[in-house]
Image (cartoon, rainbow, N blue to C red):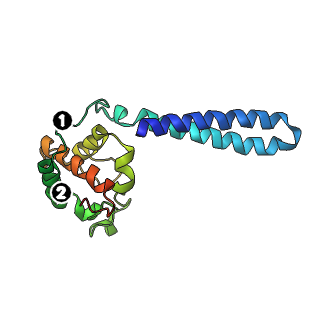
Amino acid sequence: MGNWLGWGLIGVGLGVTLLSFWLRRQREFVALSVLVLAIGILLLVTGGLQALDLTALSGAAASTTNPVPPTDASIARGRVLYGQHCAACHGATGRGDGPAAAGLNPGPADLQVHVPLHTDAAIFDWITNGIPGSAMLAQGEAIRPEDRWNIINYLRVLVSSPTGRGE
């Protein structure tokens, strides 16, 4: 979904930027055109970063798909592993409100927001290599690759659950 969101933001950013040039030609809207241009540029940059999907910059293959099917067994295994490795910081519902979160700066990501925006490959990369500048440590040595995919399968269920608990 991240790429579609990015391309959508780019489209809106182009439209807003073109609107700013039209406003600039209207004498009474010259000052407003500067603000509209700034918003357009912000949308273009944000959309570009989203469409690019920073996975490509981190060295992970953006085309990598989850090789572990989201079976009941995979999701159950992912739930157990999430409880062991992730819930202390990200919390039971993935909101970044686990018991260890209070002492972290920046705080843990709200997975309810981030998981739907990113590819499985990006999430796999972050679990494997951590996220520089954050408390998200590399788990590549601690969690087997298949189990990282199981966690991702569970996260997809967790964020789509009406209760936010993956049930």
Q: Nearer the viewer, residue 65 or 69?
A: 69
Instruction: Please name the residue shown 22% across and 43% down the image.
Output: 128
Instruction: Please name the residue shown 43% across and 35% down the image.
Output: 3
Residue 62: image location, x then y, percent: 32, 31
Q: Earlier in the sequence, mark 2 or mark 1?
A: 1
Which dot marks residue 67? Answer: 1
> Is disc 1 placed on a helix, strand or loop?
loop
Task: Report which quarter residue 34 is drawn in.
Answer: top right
Q: Which residue is mark 2?
A: 79
Residue 27: image location, x then y, percent: 88, 39
> On the picture, is 29 further left or further right than 60?
right
Q: Is residue 106 something that shows in the picture?
A: yes
Look at label 2 and name its amino acid. Arg
Which quadrant holds the N terminus?
top left
Instruction: Please name the residue shown 37% across and 61% down the image.
Output: 105
Q: Residue furthest right?
A: 27
Q: Nearer the viewer, residue 106 or 63?
A: 63
> Is disc 2 placed on a helix, strand or loop?
helix
Residue 155: image location, x then y, percent: 26, 52
Look at label 1 and name its amino acid. Pro
Residue 125: image location, x then y, percent: 26, 40
Instruction: Please name the residue shown 18% across and 61% down the image.
Output: 83
Which quadrant holds the C terminus?
bottom left
Label 2 to label 1, Cα distance in Å? 18 Å
Q: Is residue 135 something that shows in the picture?
A: no
Task: Report which quarter residue 90 is drawn in.
Answer: bottom left
> On the picture, is 86 further left or further right than 30?
left
Q: Nearer the viewer, residue 62 or 56?
A: 62
Task: Report which quarter residue 55 is drawn in.
Answer: top left
Q: Residues within 10 Å of mark 1 (few under 14, many from 20)?
A: few
